[in-house]
Image (tube, grey):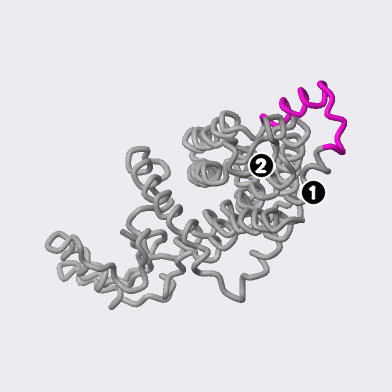
Amino acid sequence: MTVHRLLKIVVIAGALATAANASDHVFLPEQPAASAGLDRIDSFEQSDAGSSDNSGSQSPPGLDRRDRIFYPGDTERPKPLLRKLFLNIAFDQKDIFTSPFHVNRHDALEWLVPMAATGALIATDTHIANAFENSRGQVRWGGRISQIGAAYTLVPIVAGSYVYGAWRDSAKAREIGVLGTESLLDSLIVSGVLKEVFRRNRPDEKNPGDFWGGGTSFPSGHAIQVWTIASLLDHEYKHNRIVGITAYSLAGIVSAARVAAQRHFASDVVAGGSMGWFIGRYVYDTHMSHLAHKHASLIPMIVPQVDPLQRRYAFALVFRPGF
């Protein structure tokens, strides 16, 4: 194998670094809301009161930059939801594309395995592609099956989940619709950027497999999208394994179909699938980390009840919604 070929393998395998570590940076709060005392609540209120005078002031300790942008209660209000959704996506992209600078020994294995698999497949892509029959029927059916992972198939599914949740007042369905949309847009941006960076020719194009040849083969957009949704569903329904098994099975079929349709090489779908899985987990974990925050839950408070006319003195336990 030539030095040039080895260089390609190293460079392309490194692309997985843009997503492999993103899920480990989920902005966990410094202190759970359940353990926050009244002093901390007062400090939050004082910070909010002073925000009008100093809009650029720093957020209170224990809160991160997403706290004022997204929380589950907004999933039934489309106008603020859309604004907050796109701001979340902007933060997601920053975290994903800067993730290589945050790698450490604890998540090194999550980087090395996908990178090694992608590098090995790049070296054998042509042999794998030639192992298929590559008949006209195979290519036609592969293309049809793989459309399950197309954006125009997945977008109506996640949108339908949100509509169903709004209709049946199901917070879970709305959440899947919101996070599914965020995940899909994240994966579309990542795959679009990397396609322009590597410009690999597809198997059915001139000079198949060549990088920087003007193609859009690496990574597979269908694979990254379908594995993103599969990962999100698996994490959302972690206690119902049949959902994850079904989602991953469909994702695997779509990925294999893209190779059978001669639209992608094996390394394209493995790279895309790996990135998609990490993006789905990242979006879910980032969202779940905010459920422990003050604004995403009801805060128990002891409130004195005084009524001199009735000579009634008592204390009431009330739950105050977070801001």
Measure the C-alpha gap from mark 2 to mark 1: 13 Å
Residue 85 lies, in percent from the top left, at 40, 46
Observer-nearest of 37 and 14: 14
Q: Quadrant of the N terminus?
A: bottom right
Instruction: Tell me if 297 is positioned left or right of 186 in this view.
Output: left
| Secondary element at tag 2 | loop
Q: Quadrant of residue 269?
A: top right
Which residue appears at 63% of the width and 70% of the height? 108
Badge 1: how crowded within 10 Å, few (<14), some, or many (20+)? some
Upstream in sequence: badge 2 or badge 1 = 1
Which residue range is magenta in the image?
Answer: 130-147
- Tag of residue 210: 2
* Residue 183 x %, y %: 52, 46
Of the pair 186 and 322, the residue shown nearer to us: 186
Describe residue 271's horizontal placement relative to residue 89 as left or right. Answer: right
Question: Tag on residue 142?
Answer: none
Does 244 appear above or below 162? below
- In this rendering, the label closer to the viewer, 2 or 1: 2
Task: State the residue at coordinates (71%, 56%).
Answer: 119
Tell me if residue 138 is in the magenta stretch: yes
Say which amino acid is labelled 2.
Answer: Asp
Task: Residue 229: give x, y in percent of width and height.
Answer: 61, 44
Give amino acid for label 1. Answer: Thr
Residue receiving disc 1? 124
Is 221 covered by the magenta stretch?
Answer: no
Total count of labels = 2
Q: Quadrant of the C terminus?
A: bottom left
Residue 111 placement: quadrant: bottom right
Horizontal side of residue 129 vs 30, given as left or right: right
47 vs 231, nearest the viewer: 231
